[in-house]
Structure formats: C-alpha cells, structure tokens
C-alpha cells in the first residue's frame, strides 16, 4: 500500500507542468508574483488561467521559445503588460465582482501574431509596355489641331526619347510626348 501511495505521489509531482518547468504564479488582491524560468509564454498563460480563474482566448495560437521572468507583487495590469509585451495586442475584461484569490480580469483576449502580405508590384499603364512610373515618365497625347496659317511648335524632346521604340512608334502615329505633371 505504501508503494502505491508513493507511486501516485511521485506521478502527481512530475505531471505538473508548472512545477516541472520552473513556474510559480500567485495572484492576490490585484497583485501578481511570478517566477518563470525557461518556460514558454503559453505555459505562463495556462498557469495564469488556472490560478487566476481567468478565461484566456487564443492562448493556443501564441508561439515563442522559453523565457525567464521574475515579477514580485506588481499590479496585475503591469504584470500583464510585461508578460504580453511580445504579443501584438490584448484586451482584458474586468470581473464584475472581485475575488481575493483570483485575477481582476474575467477574460483576456490575445491578438496572435499575424503575417504581413506583401503588396503586389505596380503594373505599367495599359497600352505602354515597359514604362516605369516616376520622374522620367512620358505621357503621349494626340497632336492638337492647328488653325490655318499657324505653325506647330516643335516638341521638346528629352535626350532618351530616341532610344525608346514605343515613343518612336507613337510619334509615327501622330502622338507627341508631353512631360508628366509633377505629383502633389
């Protein structure tokens, strides 16, 4: 019988993830004492939920390696800010009725880390292939109609116009280059 009791005691001590990992947490009257050595944020939050009788939403989506942290008798809001500094954001809902041995928060909603989606590269304007928007961008407009007896003004031609076959083809079609307006 002694062997059975000793075996159950040993099993109970080794099965506790908080003790095995070096995690001690106490919450009393809105103040927190935390001693966490080489434990993950998820383990701290699981213990916070158990000890503080708090519902923590999205704790399973929090990732990260082990951390070491020690807080002694700090206000619970400050402790949460410190513990959750690696989380993009959180919302804590206060309890309606405060309990002495529980968290002042009824539930804590965690915003898990998100992946930023890269923006699509800018596309060239339709009909003009290979053009890059910017200071050297040239707009092509139809040649203005002239009144009888008025000579057309020669267009200002940038130095690189002769190198661009699209501009040469547009000029052959009766379009003249016009400098793009400055942004702003």
Image (cartoon, grey):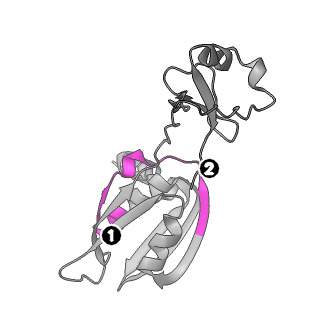
**Front-most of residues 89 and 77:** 89
Q: Residue at x 57, y 19 (%)?
A: 174
**Which mark identifies residue 169?**
none
Q: Position of residue 72 (x, y in %)?
A: 54, 81
Q: Position of residue 180 (x, y in %)?
A: 61, 41
Q: Of label 2 and label 1, which has the lower sequence position?
A: 1
Q: Position of residue 164 (x, y in %)?
A: 72, 19
Look at the image and tell me whether residue 32 can be seen. no
Query: Which residue does the numbered mark 2 point to in the structure image?
Result: 182
Give the residue furthest to the right: 159
Q: Is residue 94 magenta?
A: no
Give the residue furthest to the front: 149
Classify 14 as above or below 94.
above
Q: Residue at x 50, y 56 (%)?
A: 41
**Front-most of residues 150 and 64:** 150
Quadrant of the image occupied by residue 176 = top right
Q: Position of residue 59 (x, y in %)?
A: 38, 52
Classify 33 as above or below 141.
below
Looking at the rendered structure, the secondary structure element under dot 2 is: loop
**Front-most of residues 173 and 20:** 173
Q: Quadrant of the C terminus?
A: bottom right
Apparent side of residue 87 relative to residue 97 in the rendered image (left or right): right
Query: Which residue does the numbered mark 1 point to in the structure image?
Result: 92
Quadrant of the image occupied by residue 32 = bottom left
Q: Residue at x 65, y 35 (%)?
A: 137
Q: CA distance from mark 2 to mark 1?
A: 49 Å
Classify 107 as above or below 136.
below
Apparent side of residue 105 relative to residue 62 in the rendered image (left or right): left
Highlighted range, magenta? 48-69
Q: Residue at x 51, y 62 (%)?
A: 23
């Amino acid at each position: 019988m002694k062997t059975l009791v000793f075996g159950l005691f040993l099993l109970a001590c080794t099965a506790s993830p908080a003790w095995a990992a070096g995690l001690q947490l106490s919450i009393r009257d809105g103040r927190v004492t935390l001693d966490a050595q080489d434990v993950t944020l998820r383990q701290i939050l699981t213990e916070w939920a158990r000890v503080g009788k708090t519902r923590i939403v999205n704790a399973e989506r929090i990732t990260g390696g082990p951390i070491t942290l020690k807080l002694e008798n700090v206000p619970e809001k400050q402790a949460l800010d410190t513990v959750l500094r690696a989380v993009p954001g959180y919302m804590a809902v206060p309890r309606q009725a405060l309990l002495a041995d529980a968290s002042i928060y009824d539930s804590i909603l965690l915003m898990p880390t998100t992946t930023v989606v890269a923006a699509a590269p800018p596309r060239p304007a339709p009909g003009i292939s290979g053009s890059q928007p910017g200071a050297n961008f040239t707009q092509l407009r139809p040649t203005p109609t002239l009144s009888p007896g008025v000579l057309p003004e020669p267009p200002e031609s940038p130095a690189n116009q002769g190198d661009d076959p699209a501009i040469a083809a547009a000029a052959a079609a009766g379009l003249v280059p016009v400098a793009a307006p400055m942004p702003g």
